[in-house]
Amino acid sequence: MGIIMEGKTVSSALKEKVKKEVEEIKIKYGKTPKLTVILCGDDPASIIYVKNKEKACAALKIDSEVIRFDSNASEEEIKKTINVLAKDEKVNGILVQLPLPKGINERNIIELIPLEKDVDGLTSLNVSKLVRGEEGIVPCTPLGIIDMLDYYAIPLEGKRVSVVGRSMLVGKPLFNLLTNRNATVTLCHSKTKDLKEETRLSDIVIMAIGKPLFLKEDMIKDGAIVIDVGINRIDGQIYGDADFENLKNKASYITPVPGGCGLMTVAELLNNTIKCFYLQNRK
Ligand code: NDP
């Protein structure tokens, strides 16, 4: 059986590092880092994600605040709030919980977040830095995957990687992060002609499509590494995009769902909040 990559172990190590940094910041700057989350509407998954983020901040003594709008809030109202937060010196990170309700243009909102408060790394400026391979704030889920691979000392240089799913939140930033680490990356999506042909050639297969138990053992080569980003809720149960039970004996390393990438995402958000604090406070 392959090695199970434990999100709990890796995320705990990262949280421990963040906790120490929060303590150092308090001593050195007399300040507490703060994350502000904008939550619009009543999407149940978004409400759960935001609660988890608040809890994680509290555990590490990072200040957090959730500003709620109902689902018929106007784009102008949200923009106004972002502009106030952008100038508020106490706020170090601004996160807009996606998706926003229909009728609100996500890009118009996101682009108002200043580069150094963009904890989700979604503004054009941070995306451009990532593409260029420059230091910036990187989206939390892809960053968590790279940290997970590094924790298990999995080399990336020269490796063939299939990233399945091309969203701005996961697939595209991962493509860039892996390319910047000298992997040879194929970005697959719903129009990919023969997905199995791509994934079977890959040393590492990363699934982020939102289709439960999609990846099966006939789609990977012996000893491949499988990273599963998918979170699919069916009848109160959570399933990944990879069929863990079917794959676990063929893969050399595999992430479980739950207990894998999801835990890393939250830890990276806390880490990004600290990075943002330093961007605003280090002279
Ligand atoms: P999106 O819905 O934004 O994108 C899905 C991507 O998958 C698209 O690029 C789509 O292709 C592709 N796709 C869909 N069906 C297939 C298929 N049959 N074969 C190949 N490609 C396909 O999803 P997200 O990136 O936001 O999320 C993906 C999954 O990851 C979801 O389950 C989500 O819940 C989970 N997630 C987990 C996180 C975590 O912390 N663990 C964080 C973020 C997301 P096309 O572009 O052609 O439409």
Image (cartoon, grey):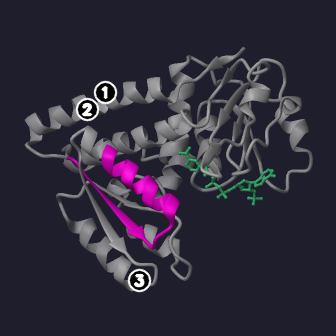
For the point 70% across and 29% down, the residue is 226
Q: Label 1: which residue?
A: 16
The answer to whether 5 is drawn above or below residue 45 in the figure is above
Answer yes or no: do the residues labelled 2 and 1 have beta carbons within 8 Å?
yes
For the point 50% across and 21% down, the residue is 151
Confirm whether residue 225 shows in the render.
Answer: yes
Q: Label 3: which residue?
A: 73
- Report the front residue among 190 and 241: 241
The answer to whether 135 is drawn above or below residue 253 in the figure is below
Tell me where the magenta segment starts and ends, as one range: 33-55
Name which quarter of the figure residue 256 lies in: top right
The answer to whether 272 is drawn above or below residue 117 in the figure is above
The image position of residue 85, as x and y in percent, is 26, 67
Q: Earlier in the sequence, mark 3 or mark 2?
A: 2
Instruction: Tell whether circle 1 marks a residue whose Cβ is less than 8 angstroms from ligand 1.
Output: no
Q: Amino acid at mark 2?
A: Lys
Q: Label 2: which residue?
A: 19
Q: Amino acid at mark 3?
A: Ala
